[in-house]
Image: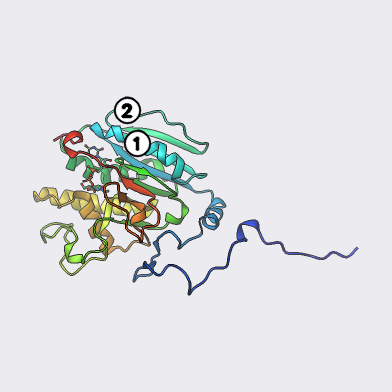
Amino acid sequence: TDYVFHLKTPDHLQYSQPSIVKGRTDVVAVTPWLAPIVWEGTFNPVLLDSIYKQKKINIAVTVFAVGKYIMFLKNFLETAEKHFFVGFNVHVYVFTDRPKEVPKVNMAPGRQLTVCSVPSSNRWQEISARRMELIQKLIEEQLRKHSNYIFCLDVDSQFHSRWGTESLGGLVAVIHPGYYLDDRGKFPYERRPESRAYVAHGEGDFYYCGGAFGGLLQEVFLLANTCRSNFEEDAKNAIEAAWQEESHLNRYMWINKPSKVLSPEYLWQDFKPRNPEVKTIRFSGVIKNYADIRPN
Ligand code: UD2
């Protein structure tokens, strides 16, 4: 018998035709250094997932819940189950001084949680800033063998819709929802040249969030290491950057451009009405009363 060979298209490659002239026109989807800026409508989630499914990736997440911030953890974890890398291997590392208060949240197969004990602190600035050191150590001591990517997220936040494989990249930064319509002269960068977080007026690309960043382990290791040593160098000179590690992160991202930028869909703020270009809010900071939750 004669055989007729049909080269069959794999199922995951059946999708509608992409275009280079039609698409979103209300937002910019690429930086001047050609990093994608991820907005709803600029990617095909099903296609992306199918590409990464074959790679069997592992994603680590760090979240700090020190002192009263433990109260935010349950909602963070529950909403992550619903929206964050659903169907992928996710390992959440919870850093807390209250390990007994870590809530039990059902996690889907392939997802797990590890509690890491950290000391309490009386200064919220220190808690926030010490994260870089602990992230660096975690990558060095535990993640290298298991994980490919890491995301470092604020605990006082929640997921509302998909945050998935479209966010993966070498070095990933999220644009802060509060400043993206402003002139960069108004960004709350550290403006004192004595600080290692200094960004001059007339410089800078975007103002990025301290509350969400990530990427490949090695890239995030370098970021955490640099931010940590710059923070410590500042401390020796009795200087604390305006927004602690967020300021150092912004300086780092100015010098070392992120290879993927996530739009403010990836960190909105619950008190802020949604702007029209934000078609979907994926992750947001919850409303909190600083006086109630901070140690000082
Ligand atoms: C901004 C940033 C935050 C950080 C901070 C600068 C966003 C959305 N947030 O938020 O990431 O850069 O400015 O200092 O970009 N934490 C505790 N216990 C505490 C205090 C803080 O666990 O007592 C942890 C917790 O994970 C929290 C994070 O540190 O989410 C940041 O602290 P924050 O939320 O109080 O900082 P905030 O809202 O000023």
Distance from disc 2 to disc 1, alpha carbons, whole Å, reads 9 Å
Badge 2: few (under 14), some or many (20 or more) residues near its Cα, within 10 Å? some
Badge 1: few (under 14), some or many (20 or more) residues near its Cα, within 10 Å? many
Q: Amino acid at mark 2?
A: Pro
Question: Does mark 1's beta carbon lie closer than 8 Å to ligand 1?
Answer: no
User: Residue, x 26% and y 47% (percent of image)?
Assistant: 271
Figure quadrant, ligand 1: top left
User: On residue 99, which mark appears?
Assistant: 2
Rendering coords of residue 264 (x, y %): 33, 56
Which SS class for mark 1?
Answer: strand
Which SS class for mark 2?
Answer: helix
> Which badge, 2 or 1, comes first in the chain's sequence?
1
User: Residue, x 76% and y 64% (percent of image)?
Assistant: 6
Rendering coords of residue 150 (x, y %): 39, 48
As drawn, 36 above or below 141: below
Instruction: Tell me the quarter of the image containing the N terminus.
Output: bottom right
Q: Which image quarter: residue 90?
A: top left
Rendering coords of residue 170 (x, y %): 40, 58
Task: Give the residue number, with chain letter if any, for mark 1.
Answer: 94
- 22 left or right of 75 in image: right
Q: Nearer the viewer, residue 132 or 71?
A: 71
Rendering coords of residue 79 (x, y %): 41, 40
- 43 left or right of 132 in image: right
User: Residue, x 34% and y 61% (percent of image)?
Assistant: 258
As drawn, 151 above or below 66: below
Instruction: Tell me the quarter of the image containing the C terminus.
Output: top left
Q: Which image quarter: residue 18?
A: bottom right
Is any atom of residue 145 visible in this view?
A: no
